[in-house]
Structure formats: C-alpha cells, structure tokens
Amino acid sequence: MAQERCATTVCLKVRSPITGLRRSNHQLTGVVVTDQILLGLGIATALLSLWAAVFATQAYLATRRATALAEQRWQDSVRPAPRLSFTTPPAPGQAIELEVENLGGTLAAGAVIVQAADDLYAGELTLPEHAPPRRIYLNPVLKAWQRKPQPSCLLLVGRDLSGQCWDYLDGNKAINDPRKWMASQLRELRLSGIVDFPAVTGPAKAR
C-alpha cells in the first residue's frame, strides 16, 4: 500500500508540471491572438482614416471647383461685354462714327479710344445690359504720332454695376487699380492731360 501511495504521489508530482506547461502554452497562444487582433484593428482604423481623409479632400476640391464655377458664371452674367465696329471713314477733323453693342451686363461707365488714319478719337459710353447695336460718335482729340492704314481700337475699358473695371482689349482682364491703370495707358498713348475718364476711374483725389 505504501508503494502504491508513493507511486501515486510521484505520478501526481510528475503530471502537475506538464499540466501547468499546457496551461502556459494556452495563455501564450491567447496573448498572441489578442495582439494580432489588436494589430489588425489598428491597421483597419488607419486605412479607414486614410480613406476618410482622401474623400474629405476630394469633397473639398469639388466644393472649390463648384464655387469657382458659380463665381465665373456670376461674373459672366454681370460683366459688360461691349463690342465696337467701324462704319464709315471719318472726314478730316470730324467725329468718327462707331457701332457698339453690349452682349453682357450693364456697362455703368466705359471709355474708348480709337485711331483712324492719323487722328485719335476718344469718348465715354454707357450701355444697358444686352443692348442691341447702336451708333455713337467720338470726337478727335489729338494727331497720332504714326499713321495707321486701318482704323483700330486702342483702349476699351468698362465698369460694371459692382464697381469692378475690365480691360476688354486684354481678354476681359480685371483691373484692380483703375486710376493707376488708366494713367499708364494714357501716358503710353501720349494723351496724359488731354483726356480723362472720371466716370471709369472715379473723381480725382484732393491734394
């Protein structure tokens, strides 16, 4: 009986470490699986965050494009679009006749300078929106320094109802400082102090 108890005791003592080892292996396996799950969740979260950032960026760019397109359409609807054409050659020392129409918004104030032969002609104009062709007359202001065989428009600028000025000879370019811009144009045409367009550039500043 003593030997059987001893054998049983020894057997129990031998089996106990093996059982603990198995439990340790199961615990380690569970920790590894948990780490892998957490790693997978982290990667998935990072990917979702990346996609969300990409979609947010695309939505922002689409909104900017839509806003820019709406702004462009609004400018096209309110920006005046005058067009000039020459009718008959002027008599020496007489006003020149032009035909003008407006394909855009209201032209609150405009200025035009043309040359025919060796004379320069200048004047102001206003046009309602989508105005049909009409005849206008510009008076001669100065002899040109160089004769041209064909009449040509040297300056065509206008201001819309919002106060924005546009240079129609330079691709409808917006003019940020009309007074400075006009002074430069008149200086190049040698018309400084001869003509002025206060309705376009605004009244002269008091000194």
Image: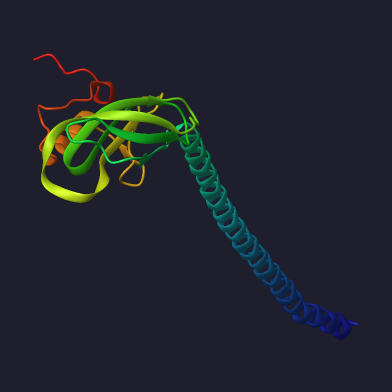
Q: Residue furthest front?
A: 91
Percent across and percent down for residue 82 are 40, 36
Q: Residue at x 59, y 53 (%)?
A: 55
Tell me: residue 56, above or below residue 39.
above
Q: Hey, which quadrant is residue 122 in on the image?
A: top left
Q: Hey, which quadrant is residue 10 in on the image?
A: bottom right
Q: Is residue 180 left or right of residue 34?
A: left
Q: Residue furthest right?
A: 1
Q: Is residue 121 visible?
A: yes
Tell me: residue 143, above or below residue 59.
above
Which residue is more in the foreground, 173 or 109? Answer: 109
Tell me: residue 200, above or below residue 81.
above
Looking at the rendering, in which quadrant would you find the C terminus? top left
Tell me: residue 75, above or below residue 47.
above
Percent across and percent down for residue 160 are 39, 28
Q: Is residue 102 left or right of residue 164?
A: right
Which residue is more in the foreground, 177 or 108? Answer: 108
Total count of labels: 0
Percent across and percent down for residue 7 are 83, 84
Q: Is residue 152 left or right of residue 191?
A: right
Q: Residue at x 86, y 80 (%)?
A: 5
Q: Is residue 125 left or right of residue 29?
A: left
Looking at the rendering, in which quadrant would you find the N terminus? bottom right
Q: Residue at x 48, y 41 (%)?
A: 72
Which residue is more in the foreground, 46 or 2? Answer: 46
Q: Is residue 108 visible?
A: no
Percent across and percent down for residue 51 are 59, 57
By what rule are the colours in the image chosen?
rainbow
